[in-house]
Amino acid sequence: MLEVKNLKVVFHQNCNPVVAVNEFSFSITSGETLGLVGESGSGKTVSSLALLGLLNNKNVSISGNAFLNLQQPVDLLQLTEKQLTAIRGRHIAMIMQEPMQAFNPLFTCGHQVAETIRKHTALNKNDAIEKVLQLFEKVKLPNPLQISKRYPHQLSGGQLQRVAIAMAISCNPSLLIADEPTTALDASVQKDILVLLQQLQSENNMSMLFISHDLEAVKLIAHRTLVVHAGQIVEQGKTETLFAHPIQDYTKELLQSRLSTFKKNSVIGEKIILSVENLNKSYNQRQGLLRSPKNITNAVDNISFTIKQGETLGIAGESGSGKTTLAKLLLRLIETDSGKIKLNEEDLTHYPIRTKQEWRKKIQAVFQNPHGSLDPEMTVGRQLTEVMQLHDSPQNATIVKNKIIDWFEKVGLTEQHFNRFPHELSSGQKQRLCIARALIPAPDLLICDEAVSALDVSVQAKILELINSLQQQFHFGCIFISHDLKVIRQMCDNVLVMKDGKADCYLETEKLFKQPPTTYSEILLKSIL
């Protein structure tokens, strides 16, 4: 179905060429899934974007061949933009790593999926809408009709990723490029999506390039696996054989990193850093600007908990359960309906949202989507310089830069990244930058909303250990929101499980994993890959 020969992608930055993809050669047969694994920044996503002609930039040069077997082989790298437009979506579809970038914020999700269907098929408007609802049911979206009428910003990251998957499979493509398709999904939905992709593949004899840092997902779905490092292919073979008997040292290290035995180790103090009492937040879903509310969604429903010095509270639950809304309430990014949020005994709910109080630097956050957390027009070095100048005593530029480079090294970046812009970094690199930025002000409370979901396993363990070591040093409290229950178990002292905005259970981590107290928490634990 696809044969790639000597694919090379070079970025020209300030007259210094950076080889992102160096002579990739591989093939995918009909009905086959090829897994593509490697660390963040290894060239996985860049190679897929090059195949689809989505790297059109005067500072990028692409060479090689990529033959797609339709009625007759066509070289994707030699096609015009008009020719590629006819192929994209119909013959080749892609599930993007960051779903928010795949949608137009001005149109509803249902409209955008229906638009794709109508562009590449003969279905009329009503039939296209009906197919959209069927697709939303297939990808396990709750209330498909309601979701179809919502805009992208009104959905959680996991829900939006499922809409992206529905859009990608809407026209039964011959080749599906899935770039981290389950990264934003909770564990219970991950398996469903992987099974769904396998079913669709079987029904339509669809080929798939499955890009992921989740090695367990690759092991489950891929027939063959390609291992890449620093822009080069280092090993490839049948997935079962490669996982059981890796040949190259890098592959061995990569596979070993998924078996990390890191365990949180910190001392919990007596002082309560954060106290949350009966917190509530609801949203009204309206049919029009002048009409009365149609539906009321209780996004956060009577939530209470405390966090002490050095304690890490895990917040788990399916996508759309209210985890991120709770984080936004704690950060005072949105108003509460009722309840109290106390930081060091200070009631934060008394302050207007836009107030610039001293307490704001005491709560820092790392969000799920690093792309939306960074200024696209500023170099990453300048962005961290602003944070350091804002929260630290005045120092000369050399000292500030050296401190920033130290932080880069702590989170797995290098001095070379200092003058780069966010779009020149991989998603994993951008997330590492966001983690460094959040830790610079030495906060009392750090809120991590899926902070390691965009990171490959080898870096994930390093970041978790970094957060843990800094927590031991500075004794800050931490809220760790994640759909990855293995990470929750590693990092957290206590866990709050949320379902439909409510607290399903709230107890010590080991008690939860040894004997889940509710049916829902038991289902969540059984879904771990």
Image (cartoon, rainbow, N blue to C red):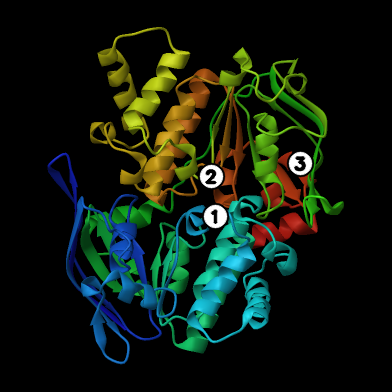
Question: How dense is the environment of label 3, judged by Cα within 10 Å: few (below 14), some, or many (20 and up)?
Answer: some
- According to the image, label 2 marks what residue? 368
| Residue 404 appearing in the image | yes
1 or 3: mark nearer the eye? 1
Outermost top residue: 394
Give how far apart the Cα atoms at labels 2 and 1 are: 8 Å
- From mark 1 to mark 3, how far is it between C-alphas? 23 Å
Label total for image:
3
Farthest right residue in view: 292
Q: Are marks 3 and 2 in contact (CB under 8 Å)?
A: no
Residue at the spot 46% in from the left edge and 46% down from the top edge? 261
Q: Quadrant of residue 399?
A: top left
Left or right placement of residue 191 versus residue 12 in this view: right
Residue type, label 2: Gln
Q: Earlier in the sequence, mark 3 or mark 2?
A: 2
Residue matched to label 3: 506
The front one of 490 and 149 is 149
| CA distance for labels 3 and 2 | 23 Å
Please name whichever residue, 81 or 201, is drawn nearer the observer in this view of the structure: 81
Q: Is the Cβ of the residue at disc 2 closer than 8 Å to that at disc 1?
A: yes
- Give the numbered dot on residue 184: 1
Question: For residue 24, which quarter of the picture?
Answer: bottom left
